[in-house]
Image: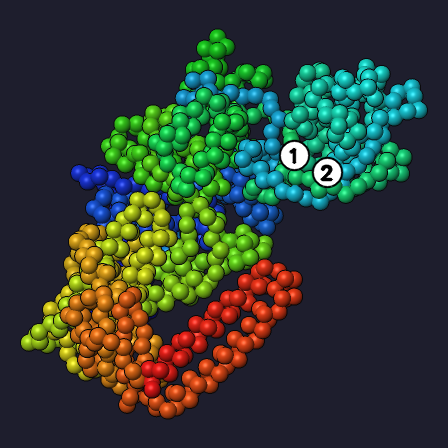
Amino acid sequence: MSLASKYDSKKSEEKWYQYWMENDFFSSVPDERESYTIVIPPPNVTGVLHMGHMLNNTIQDVLIRRARLKGYNACWVPGTDHASIATEAKVVKKLKEQGIDKNDLTREEFLKHAWDWTDEYGGIILEQLKKLGASCDWSRTKFTLDDDMSASVIKVFIDLYNKGLIYRGYRMVNWDPEAKTTLSDEEVIYEERNGHLYHLKYQIKGSEDFVSIATTRPETILGDTAICVHPEDERYTSLVGKTVIVPIVNREIPVIADEYVDMEFGTGALKITPAHDENDKKIGETHHLEVIDIFNEDATLNSFGLHYVGKDRFAVRKEISQELEEKGFLIKKEDHVHKVGTSERTKAVIEPRLSDQWFLKMEDLAQPAIDAVRNDIVELLPPKFKSTYFHWMENVRDWNISRQLMWGQRIPAYYFGDGKEDFVVASSVEEAVTLSRKRTNNNNLQPEDLRQENDVLDTWFSSWLWPISVFNGVLEPNNEEINYYYPTRDLVTGPDILFFWVARMIVAGYELRGEKPFDKVYLTGLVRDKQRRKMSKSLGNSPDALKLIEEYGADGVRVGLLLSAAAGNDIMFDEKLCQQGKGFVNKIYSAYTGLIDKWEVDKSLEQPLHAAQGIAWYKSRFNKVLEEIEDHYSKYRISDVLMSSYKLIYDDFCGWLLEIVKPEYQKPIDAKTIAQVIELFEDNLRLIHPFTPFISEELWQAIIDRKPEDALCVNSWPEVGEVDDQILTDFELVQDVIAGIRTVRKEKQIAFKNEIELKTINNENLSLEYNSLIQKMGNVSNVEVINEQLAGAASYRVKSNEYFIPLEGNIDVAAELEKLEAELKRAKGFLIGVQKKLGNERFVSNAPDAVVAIEKKKEADALAKIDTIEASMKALK
C-alpha cells in the first residue's frame, strides 16, 4: 500500500476504525482463552466527550489493546448511565422551552418525553469515543434503563428488602430544591462561601432581659421550637425551664439544657430548628420538641412563613434581616465565611429536610468490601487512596436510595393503605395484590386498590451492579458469560467516585456473588489547566475534545494526554503536549515513508559491518526496554510505558539505527539490512499500537499486503528476547564518541561533508570493530590508535579514552588561536574581578554564605575554563 508523503490523521482514523469494525476485531465471546475484561465507567447519557473522558478511556484502550495483543480474550463493555437528576433536568428544560410544565404531565407522558430526548440526544458520547479510537465491543453496549438492566435492579431491591436490609424511614435528608429530590451525602459538595453571622435577641417571657444567639440563616427563626444551653453553663442555669419569645413570630419556645451545646462557642446558646438541621433534629427528639417545616419542596416559604409565604429562601433572608433590624431584634451583622452544601448535579444550595425515604443498611454490607481492599484482594492504584476508602467505608451511613423523580427505576413498593407500614414489595402488581391480600386478610383487593411508590431509585443503585448486570449475572447468576468474564480485570476511573461507585460495586460483588468485581482499580488524576485549575465550562478552560482530535489527530491527543498521566496524580494539561504527540506520530510516519520505504534494495550487496553492529545493538536495546516496559505495565505505570516506548522509537530507532544503516546518497541498501530493519520496525509498531492505534495500523498495513487476520490490531505482542549487556555498554561509549565528533565539528565549524581523521588513546579497550561505525556516523576517513597526546588537534574524553581530531587542513589555525587568545583574556579578566571580591575580608565576613558560595563557584568555573582554553591553544601550537 503506497502512502502519501504527509500523514493525514483524519483519513487514516476513518479508514482503519471502519476496517476494525467491519472485521469485528473488538467483539468477544467466551472461548478457551483467558478473559481480560474491562467495563467502562458508564458516562451520563446526557454527556459529551470532555478531557476527563479522554484520559480515562485512553488508558482503558491502552490496557485492552495490549491484552488483545497478549492473546487474551479481551472484552471491553461500553454503555451509558441514565443519570436521573441530570437527564430529568434536561428534559424539564426542553419542556419549558415548549411551554410545557412537568407538573401538568402524567408519569407516562413525562417518560415518553424523556425517552424521546434520550433517543435523540443520548449516547452521543459513545460515538465520540470511537473518534478517540476506543476499541469497545460495541455489540455489548448497555444502558442502565435497558429492560434487563432495570429488571436486575428491581430484583436486587426486592432481595435486599426481603433480607431486612432495605427499610423506609422518616429521616433528615439532603434536599435539592431545584431538582426537588433528595441526595445522598456523597452527592453534596461543600464549598466555602462568604456570608453573614446574624446576632439576634430573644426576649425572656415576663422580663426585659433577652438571650442572644448567632445564626447564618435568620429565615429559619420561623421554625424555631427551643433555645438550648449547656446544663453546666452558669450564665443560663436560671433560665432553663423558662420560655422566650421568637422575634417576629411571637411564638413562645422553651429554654432547654443539653450537653451537646459547646459553652465556649458563640454566646453558648443555640436556636433549635428540628426540621432544618440534623443536630437540631436529634436534640428535638430527645426533648420532644415540636417540628415546624417552613419550606416548600422548591425552598420557598410555606404557610409557616407568615408574610413571607411563597418567597424564595434567599430573598427572605435579606428581607427578614432588615425586618429584625428595624424592630430592634438584630444586635449586629458581621461577615462570615462558612461551608455550604451544594448539589453535585444542579449546584443548588442543599436544604436539610425531614422526609420519608428508602434506605439501605450499609454497616454489615461494607465489611467484606473493607477486608477486600485491606488485604489487596482488590488493589487500589495508587495505594494512597486506601486511607480515603477506609475513612468512608468504616464510617459508612445507611444509603438513601430513593429519589423524587420520574426518570429511573420506580421503587417496587405498593401501598394498600394510608399508614407508613401499609405496603408490600413485589416485582409486579399481580404479585403485590397476592401479598397485600395476605397482609390484610382481604381477598377482595384488586390491582386498582394499590398505589405504587412514586419515587425512583438512586442512579448509583443501578450502576453499583454494572460489572454483574452487563453480563446478566443478576437475573441468571450462573450463565456462561458471567462465569467467564467475571470478576473483571481492571477498572479505570476517577478518585472522585471512589465511594459513589467503586466501593459500592465491591459491596455488590460480595453481597450478590460472594466475590470481588475486579482485580485492580486504576485511579486517574483530574485533568487541570496550566494554572492547576479544574477544567470546567464556567471557567472556559476546557478545550473541545473533538477539536483537539481534529487538530492533532487521535493518536497525537492520546500521546499528549498520557505523557504526564501518572496514576492518581492530577494532570496539568497543556495543548503543547498534544503537539508533541502529533510530532511523535509524524516522526514514525516519516521514518517509514521518508527513509525505509524510499531505499532501493540491491540483493547482491553484502551487509556492511556497521549495519550489522547497529542492528545487533538495537535488538538488545529493544529487549532491554521491553523488559522495563513489562515491569511498568505490571505496576500500572502507563505514562512510564509510553515514555520508554517514545524514547526507544524516537531516539534509538529513528535517531540512531536508521542513521547507522542509511545508505549513502543515491546508493542502494543491502537486502539483509532492510529486512532486519523492517522486522524491528514491526516490533516497534506492536509496542506502540496501544497508544497510537491508527498510525501503527496504517504503517503495518503499508509494509506488505496483509489478510484481515494479520492486522496489527489482532496480532501479537513482542516477546522479550536476549539482551547482550556488553554490546549495550560498548554502544553507549560509541555513541558518546560520535557525539564528541559532532560537537567538535560544530565548535570548529567543520562541515560534515569534510572528511576528518580521528586518533584515540584507547584506555577502555573498545573493540576496533566499531571503527567502521564511528567512521560512518562521523564522516571519519580512518580511526588510528595512538599512545600519547596529539598536538595541533581538538580533543575530548569519553570515560578514560582520549580522542583527537587533527585540525590542520580543516580550520584556519592562526584564526582559531586568535579567537582562543581573546577568550582567554576575557576569562582571566573575569577571574581577577571575582578573586578581588573574594580577597575583600569585609565582603567575605558580611555577605550571606550563599552569596559567598556563588562567588567561589564563579572562581572555580573561570579557572576550569582557562585550563580548557590553554589546553586547546597548546594542542594547536
Whichever of callouts 2 and 1 sits on the residue coming sooner in the sequence is: 2
- In this figure, which residue is indicated by the disc labeled 1? 351
- Whether 656 is drawn above or below 476: the answer is below
**For the residues bearing labels 2 and 1, Cβ distance under 8 angstroms:** yes
Which residue is at 26% across, 64% downward? 732
Above or below, 88 against 703 in this view is above
When the figure is inspected, residue 327 is found, relative to residue 716, above or below; the finding is above
| Residue 325 x %, y % | 87, 38
Outermost residue to the left = 604
Q: Give the residue at mark 2.
A: 313
**Residue drawn at (83%, 29%), measured in percent from left and top?**
212
Image quarter in which the N terminus is found: bottom left
Residue 466 image offset from top left, x and y in percent: 38, 36
Q: Crowdedness of circle 1 by 10 Å Cα count: few (<14), some, many (20+)?
A: many
The amino acid type of the residue labelled 1 equals: Glu
Residue 745 image point, x, y percent: 32, 80
For the rendered model, the colour scheme is: rainbow
At label 2, the amino acid type is Arg
Front-most of residues 346 and 648:
648
Residue located at (23% from left, 43% from top): 73
The residue tagged with tag 2: helix, strand or loop?
helix
Q: Residue at x 34, y 55 (%)?
A: 642
- Mark 2 and mark 1: span between their CA atoms? 10 Å
Of residue 676 and residue 286, the one placed in the foreground of this image is 676
In the displayed structure, does residue 582 sit left or right of residue 168?
A: left
Which quadrant, please, contains the C terminus?
bottom left
Q: Nearer the viewer, residue 762 or 487?
A: 762
